[in-house]
Amino acid sequence: MARIIKFFETTLRDGEQTPGINYFAEEKLEIARALADMGFDTLDCGFAISGEPEFEAIRLIARTVENAEICSIARCYPDDIDRAWESVKDAAHSAIHPFISTSPLHREVKLGKTRAEVLEMARTSVARGRQYTPNVDFALEDTTRTEHDFILEIVGAVMQEGVRFVSLCDTVGYALPWEFGALVDDVRREYPGVHISAHCHDDLGLAVANALTALQHGAERVDTCFNGLGERAGNAATEDVVMAIRTRHEDLDLDVRVDTTKIIPTSRLIARLSGMQPQWTKSIVGANAFAHGGGIHQDGVLKDARTYEIMRPADIGLPDAERRMFVGKLSGRAALNAQLHELGYDLDPDQLRCAFTLVKNMLGKKKTLEEMDLRRCAETAVNPTAAAEAYTSEAASTAGE
């Protein structure tokens, strides 16, 4: 039976750290509701100590959203832990998530702390959080640039204090998949009872690969952001991890309890409220994810979409009507015929050849064709004389204005 993967969905916290994004409280609540309704386990809703607006937004979510666990992160300081708990304590399901930098560079430059001091801060933060709730997770920031023995030492210390999940963080997107998998193996070998969450960034374009590798090696949870939002190049994209597991669940022996048909509506909600649209070629949710431009591809998809699509648009909540055949320089007759049929034209083979030639000629002068361009090519192919007279009349009328 496939192992079900848990999600620490961090669009509302790490996603909001994307430069240029600022959610108001009601917007955060709207996103939180959408994520909870999809079935994500824990929502990382913010950093309560960072300011009153953030605290109030987290508390609003905690008091409103009942179908997901509501979490606030905290540094390893007593005031942070206390404030995080205050923000989520009214939730039906609540959690707090302390973190601390562990790598030599971060200890020296950011914290000015020794290994021993960082270890003690980690231990005491989990202990303090456990006074409030058993749902205390802990993150080792910059895990993948931290000494191996120190990683194991910290994991052991927080486990003794009753930590629930330990988050191994590739904070700067530095790890290679086989390195990250080996790290998960080592931690699980040293502490067989540990529950690991994988937090991966995309600086080298490996966030999703690292996250999936961690899951294959026994991590039970993954931290993700919708639309690949997050610091710098972003986090592992929620939609990518979900659909990679769902599409390849038999090979991975993993699965998710997430309503994938809500991916597109949720992605578009987040894009609208964040003001950041996914790039056109973004996997799963990009505008071109189900668009086809090459003639060979178009012909295949028109015959059977499985030839070039490994998932159905409906699987992610995208209507089939939004599958696009882009009529461009490399398109074929099949795509043009399908496009013209949608516009109400049924051309015979000779007419289609004529329209196809006109389209190719027009694309030698224009980057893209609009609907009116396609209609003119079709009408010219069907009735060249009438079309020429209409366009001559139109040109004369325009000149006289």
Image (tube, grey):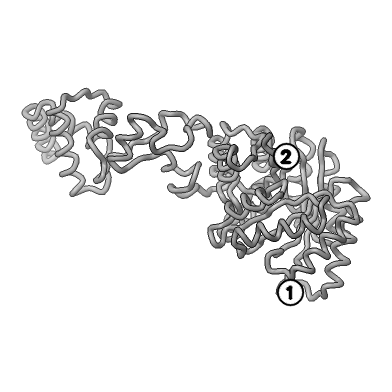
What label sits on residue 41 in the rendered view?
Answer: 2
Q: Is residue 198 left or right of residue 305?
A: right
* Separation of residues labelled 1 and 2 (CA atoms): 33 Å
Tell me the kind of residue under disc 1.
Pro
Dot 1 lies on which element?
helix
Q: Quadrant of the C terminus?
A: top left
Quarter holding residue 98: bottom right
10 Å crowding of disc 1: few (<14), some (14-19), many (20+): some
Q: Is residue 350 left or right of residue 233?
A: left
Dot 2 lies on which element?
loop
10 Å crowding of disc 2: few (<14), some (14-19), many (20+): many
Residue 360 versus residue 38 in the image, above or below = below
Question: For the point 65% across and 40% down, which residue is it?
Answer: 254
Q: Which residue is disc 1 drawn over?
A: 104
Question: For the point 71% across and 49% down, which residue is it?
Answer: 218
What label sits on residue 348 in the rendered view?
Answer: none
Measured as percent of width and height from the top left, residue 100 is found at 78, 63
Q: Quadrant of the N terminus?
A: top right
